[in-house]
Image: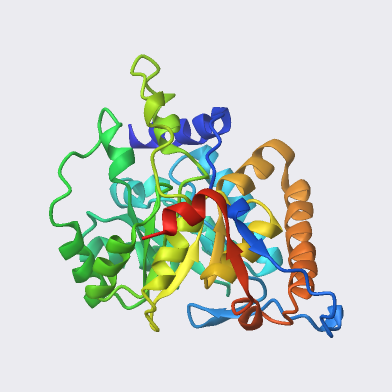
Amino acid sequence: MRKYRKTEHIENFLRSTYVGDPLFSNIFLYNDSLPEINYDEIDTSLNFLNKKVKFPLMINAMTGGSDLSEEINRSLANVAAEYDLPMAVGSQTIALEDKDSRKSFEIVREIIKDGIVISNLSGFASTEDAKLAVDLLRADAIQIHLNPAQELVQVEGERNFCGILNNIEKIVNTSEVPVIVKEVGFGMSQKTVKKLHDVGVKYVDISGFGGSNFFEIENLREPNADISDLFSWGIPTALSLIEAKKLAYDDMHIIASGGIKTSVDIVKSLCIGADMTAISGEILSYIVRGGYEYTLRYIDGLMEKTKMLMMLNGAKNISELQKVDYKVTGKLRELLED
């Protein structure tokens, strides 16, 4: 059942049509006509999970557990290895239940030999399962995903979410690698980020509204149960990111995902508070619909245009980009008003 559901999720994502607004269009950046920068000296590298990476983008959790997932993960891992991008796998719960499915996850580490690979389990995972998931991939970190909205609309989904925060604290206290707590596309509130920090979480992926919509993806699995009126539910990525950054935790690393598709989205995310950005659905679309070489051209474009925008913001490295001035407009400004 779980293996079939994973394939359904991929197919239904590719069939989905609802497009949410992460509100990046409400972030205004100033053009710098006197950048005093040599384009060839612009540095897009940064430190992430105790390793240096060349570009502030990771391939976010998508899939694993089926033959289709294995082929997709093989392609994604090759893209990640080509550009030295961190990569997270999809939920490994199936790999803990079915040893035959492990190859679809292990292929990622086989290809990304020395780069960053991130494991993934749900907030219900035991400390023992978390350790096994990390060991299977010799992972550099583990994502613990939070998906109550998705679970609620699954026929077979969970209905009891008591004790998850306490469970996450146990995983954090016993894990030998960093723990990244991740939403799946509905956005993290400032209150949620504070609760996670209070139990020792140092990495959050806010995964805001505007990208993959699991209400629609799950609704396509159950076409007789219309939940289209819920498709607009969630915290837009830009709002979630700014409010998380307002907490001003020096030891908190914020990953921005959810509707990030372009170099403009990447640059704006870094300007308003992100330490790293992540893409899942857009890269999956390129891989499945266009193929490997087409996906490489997409990543090349992201990197080149990000450097252009860094110059036009007067920033010669990521640290300087994170300090540029910006203005908030429109709906985002209204939502941020106390």
Q: Quadrant of the C terminus?
A: bottom left
- Using residue 179 as the reference point, say whether residue 25 is left or right of it: right
Residue lying at 52% horizontally and 73% vertically, measured from the top left: 275
Q: Is residue 129 above or below residue 40?
A: above
**Figure disc tally:** 0
Scheme of colours in the image: rainbow
- Using residue 7 as the reference point, say whether residue 175 is left or right of it: left
Is residue 86 at all visible to an observer of this figure?
no
Seen from the viewer's position, the closer of residues 103 and 139 is: 139
Residue lying at 56% horizontally and 50% vertically, measured from the top left: 330
For residue 271, what is the image quadrant?
bottom right
Residue lying at 43% horizontally and 47% vertically, measured from the top left: 185
Q: Position of residue 84 (x, y in %)?
A: 65, 70
Q: Is residue 224 above or below residue 140?
A: above
Q: Quadrant of the N terminus?
A: top left
Seen from the viewer's position, the closer of residues 75 and 213 is: 213
Q: Position of residue 113 (x, y in %)?
A: 58, 70
Q: Is residue 54 above or below residue 61?
A: below
Is residue 8 at all visible to an observer of this figure?
yes
Residue farthest along the top direction in this orientation: 224
Q: Position of residue 283 (x, y in %)?
A: 63, 48
For residue 197, what is the image quadrant?
bottom left
Q: Position of residue 309 (x, y in %)?
A: 76, 67
For residue 148, what is the image quadrant?
top left
Residue lying at 50% horizontally and 30% vertically, measured from the top left: 12
Seen from the viewer's position, the closer of residues 185 and 82 is: 185
